[in-house]
Amino acid sequence: MAAPILEYVGIRKGFGAQRAALDGFSLTIVEGETVALVGPSGCGKTTALKLANRLLDADAGAVRIFGQPAGEHDPVSLRRRIGYVIQEGGLLPHWTVRENVETVPRLLGWPEGRRRARAAELLTIVGLAPEEFAERRPASLSGGQRQRVGVARALAAGPSLVLMDEPFGALDPIARRSMQKEFLRWNARWEAAVLLVTHDLREAFLLADRVAVLEGGRVRQVGSREELMRSPADDFVREFVSEFAS
Amino acid sequence: MSQLGAFFWQRRADILALTGQHVLLVAVAAAIAVAIGVPLGVALARRPALARPVLGFANAVQAIPSLALFGFLIPVPLIGGIGARTAIVALVVYSLLPILRNTYAGIRGVDPAVVEAATGLGMTPNERLRLVELPLAFPVVLAGIRVAVVVGVGLATIAAAIGAGGLGVLIYRGVATVDHRLILAGAVPAAALALAFDFGLSAVEKRLGPRR
């Protein structure tokens, strides 16, 4: 059994007077595996993700990251160890593609030569020829290209944990399909654990080793596609996966 | 017209010296206003609750008639008195608002998703400010500086009333002696200065602004 890299135990997180976004949320991600968080919009998926890099802190319960309680990590250095792929790419608009990919290595103080080589390597992996794309700005890229840059940026410093928030959400179905295929190819090359948030069950089953179905702020069931389809834990999960079967 | 040209030529030494004083007044005041206004604008963007009262106060100060403000400052110790120092203080007061307001608006106007991305990648608040927020707010901040400088060039003509020199000297002298040529000898270079500063700063903006 691989070591846990990210653990949530009995998390509660609310925002003001609204019903808590997460309530009794527990989930464990081990080294090297890809876990998808799926569920209806507003079920707390993105909140869970942001607890992992301390963009948010839990009201109650424990988050352990790299075997250490979240509160003991310095948020800034923790974030530099975790890859983060944001919806729509989240690229810095005033920087070139290369500068965007080099962001975390630059913050970590890598020398320029090493940064450049790393950026070129990653751009090649995500299918953007460096000689053509490195000096372009995000505004001149298509949605799919921006998302690729976002993935390259997240991987630049070689993180052992990558958080992806609807990484392919803004794409048309055809671009989405091809990015999903490529994700599987990249994912075989890097050895990071991935926590992937998506509202698309098909995407979750395609990309993840295990899928966690989230509803009402808690995980209803975690399992492989077969487990979820064959023995759903409750009516919500049965209903949720049945839409996929049909 | 050629007569006026001849008059300007005849007074060229005077006009040049006073233009130099004028530029110095405006440039020193603008530099001080930037040094105060940009950090203060950044601080307000971090604490929006303070923004309303501070910007309101700066607005109110701006509403004081300029000649009156120059007059009020004369008896104030340390910053007052007759001469360039008082004029620079008054010009700073007037230049501050557009710079402060634009810095605040520029920083607040940076896309929150971009700010969160920068944070999520592991930037400290200072790195985020230096690498992301200030560069993205730069065109807005510079627009504020342009307004401050162009307004400052006009206001600085009034500084002559408290003995601060500048092109206002020629205008006052012309008004006192009902000599249109003297008024124009101050007003034309002042207008040209305002346009030149505006043009120069817009060139800076085009050169340094983020290409998007």
Image (spheres, rainbow, N blue to C red):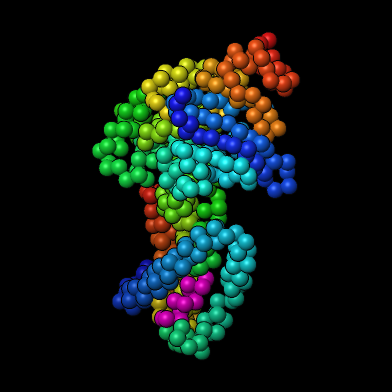
Q: Residue at x 45, y 30 (%)?
A: A3
Residue B175 percent across, percent down from the top left: 49, 81
Viewer-side residue, A37 vs B83: A37
Is residue A146 visible to the viewer in this orientation of the structure?
no
Q: Residue at x 55, y 21 (%)?
A: A210
Viewer-side residue, B13 vs B178: B13
Q: Residue at x 40, y 67 (%)?
A: B31
Is residue A231 visible to the viewer in this orientation of the structure?
yes
Q: Where on the picture, by quarter, is residue A42?
A: top right
Q: Is residue B199 magenta?
A: no
Q: Residue at x 59, y 27 (%)?
A: A37
Viewer-side residue, B113 vs B86: B113
Residue A49 percent across, percent down from the top left: 56, 36
Report whether B44 appears left or right of A43.
Answer: left
Residue A217 percent across, percent down from the top left: 67, 34
Residue B9 percent across, percent down from the top left: 32, 72
- Vertical comparison of B29 with A223: above or below: below
Rendered-image quadrant of the C terminus of chain B: top left
Rendered-image quadrant of the N terminus of chain B: bottom left
- Vertical comparison of A92 with B4: above or below: above
Q: Where on the picture, by quarter, is residue A199?
A: top right
Q: Residue furthest left?
A: A113
Q: Residue furthest top?
A: A246
Magenta highlight: main SS: helix
Report whether B94 appears left or right of B189.
Answer: right
Q: How many marks?
A: 0
Q: Residue furthest front?
A: A1
Viewer-side residue, B140 vs A84: A84
Magenta residues span B84-94
